[in-house]
Image (tube, rainbow, N blue to C red):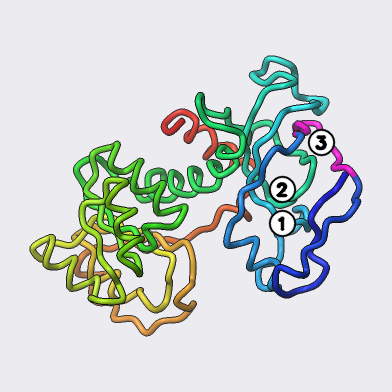
Amino acid sequence: MKAVVITESGGPEVLQLKEVEDPTVGDDEVLIKVAAAGLNRADAYQREGGHPPPKGCSPYPGLEVSGTIVSFGRNVSPGSPWNIGDQVCTLLGGGGYAEKVAVPAAQLLPVPEGVSLRDAACIPEVACTVWSTVFMTSHLSPGESFLIHGGSSGIGTFAIQISKYLGIKVFVTAGSEDKLQACKDLGADVCINYKKEDFAARIKEETEGKGVDVILDNMGGSYLQRNLDSLSIDGRLFILGFQGGTTAELNLSPLLAKRLTIQAAGMRARSPENKAKIVKEVEKNVL
């Protein structure tokens, strides 16, 4: 098959289309003929040399795809619940920039009705990331408030829509008026241009000093203290990325005084069993 290969660390020019061996289909896996692959920041980090694939994962980029099932592993039976020819989308540990991928059957999601295969390729990573972090771990609930940093990103736009559907008040940050308008169009209640104002001060103003219940953060170190200052009593901070650095000097007092929780996780390095659990919850609650 053909696959996009990272020939060395660098810019987009290091990506080359090459002939490689077809993937080996494990006993609990299915083989998918790829229709489309999602592009994620982790793919760019891997290409630049800063985000190597976890042990045992494909060295080729691509963390999510859509496509058609073409064969089953030994332990996967037709109709349980998948059949040859079904259109699906799925999380991957890597290898999505290829003509074929082998993936555990338990990680498959159906392509929603009315959604093209091209668009479906963009569903698994954002849906599984947001649902597993914000809802399964941080337990964001109807009636609570939620701050999303990077509201116009793939993660952000998905988080806005699912949160508004569930009756949650949504605050977002973004760096331009166009991005803020896009967030507002998706239903965000309060849109903050972080380049023009301090988001922590604005959150304090908008919530009359209470703060928000949950924050989803992609910045890390540079936002850590202000995130803690922006949380309410029993607030939860979930960190997804470190675009603002991996270190911070921190005043721990708010953690104790407000009983705050800080958690962090990625999706790629999770075990197949954990991914399967998340996928099951996403299919049940989102799709």
For label 2, the residue is 96
Residue 236 appears in view: no
Q: CA distance from mark 3 to mark 2?
A: 17 Å
Number of numbered discs visible in the structure rendering? 3
1 or 3: tag closer to the N-terminus: 3
3 or 2: tag closer to the N-terminus: 3
1 or 2: tag closer to the N-terminus: 1
- Image location of residue 262, percent across then percent down: 37, 63
Magenta stretch: dominant secondary structure: loop
Q: Is residue 105 magenta?
A: no
Q: CA distance from mark 1 to mark 2?
A: 6 Å
**Residue occupying the far front of the picture:** 178
Q: Residue at x 43, y 44 (%)?
A: 131
Q: Residue at x 83, y 36 (%)?
A: 25
Q: CA distance from mark 1 to mark 3?
A: 20 Å
Left or right of residue 65: residue 159: left
For label 3, the residue is 26
Q: Circle 3 — which element?
A: loop
Q: How many neighbours does mark 1 have within 10 angstroms: few (below 14), some (14-19), or many (20 or more)?
A: many
Query: Mark 1 touching mark 2, by CB under 8 A?
Result: yes
Q: Amino acid at mark 1?
A: Pro
Query: Mark 3 touching mark 2, by CB under 8 A?
Result: no
Left or right of residue 110: residue 94: right
For label 1, the residue is 61
Q: Circle 2 — which element?
A: loop
Residue range in magenta is 22-32
Q: Residue at x 61, y 62 (%)?
A: 42
